[in-house]
Image: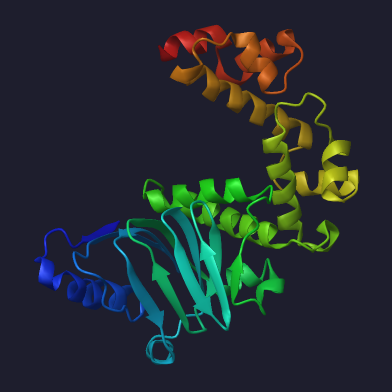
Amino acid sequence: MVTWTTDTVEARERFSYWREMICSTLFSISPEAPAERFSARLTVRTSGRCRFAMCESTSYEIIRTQRDIARAPADLYTVYLQRRGRTLINQCNESIEFQRNDIVLSDCRQPYRATLSNDGHRAVALLPRDMIEWRAPWLRHRPLSKLNANSPFIELARQHFMHLVSGELGETETSLLTDNLCNLLALASATDIEPDRMRPELQLQAMIAFCQQNLHKAELTPQVVAAYCGVSVRTLHLRFKALGQTFGTWLLESRLNACSRALKDPFQQNRTISEIAYSCGFNDLSHFNKSFRARFGMSPREWRLECD
């Protein structure tokens, strides 16, 4: 993790410092002069071919020109997650404004101009184009895309994004989460793509996302999940086999892990153990207690007391 900030720079030199030391060096862009009292902070981490950043600043404009592209070609997508404020981006005769929690993908091979609002806060990922387009070939002719805020995969994508910019992950965890993020971005952008036309990895990610959102439903069966994803039950079992698990073992483990987290949560201390078990999809307390002890080596009550 590397952090740059204008806080230690004299006010009259802050923007030139930002332009020369940050924007040009890291992202090969040409920022334009901002209003007075410019300030900014940027934290960046690099993992393999990927780069993740958290940026907050007062308002200014950034431009990626043909000259910038010629000087530093980048076969990448820039992925933005707006955390606060708003950003307006213009690219290839298209304009998109995105606000809090919106996710936008921009092809770095094409020039663009972005206007960043005052007191803006963004998470940014630079991801190799092949990692995105291998999963989502429909994006090849869409240099600028705003993901559907109502997509069932968008919240999981946000969670993965924030973990990746946090800097608290090892290389193996980062690699796995980056793959999952790319899968989720592909799924969230596939608004008119039938599930049976997707790659197996995307089908599996769609199944897992659906299950995580419906973990509390005791009637979550292979038939229900397969029907939602538009695939056969046989295909569903094949996808989970690729994880080295059956659908049943994956579901049980996911529910037990959800219960273990809830039992540790100080904001859920007023809930009974049975309430937590039912809310995670268990409908048989005897089965829950037996499974919990087998998984964690103690009863749910002992687990909760140990955390106090």
Residue at 51% in and 51% down: 101
Residue at 39% in and 80% down: 63
**Quarter of the image where the N terminus is located:** bottom left
Locate residue 247: give its quadrant.
top right
Residue 178's place in the image compared with 126, above or below, is above
**Quarter of the image where the C terminus is located:** top left
Q: Position of residue 262 (x, y in %)?
A: 54, 21
Q: Which residue ends up furthest to the front in the rendered image?
A: 35
Residue 267's place in the image compared with 257, above or below, is above
The one of 28 and 15 positioned closer to us in this rendering: 15
Residue at 29% in and 77% down: 25
4 vs 289, left or right, is left
Residue at 33% in and 81% down: 30
Q: Position of residue 10 (x, y in %)?
A: 9, 66
Q: Position of residue 118 (x, y in %)?
A: 33, 60
Residue 135's place in the image compared with 155, above or below, is below
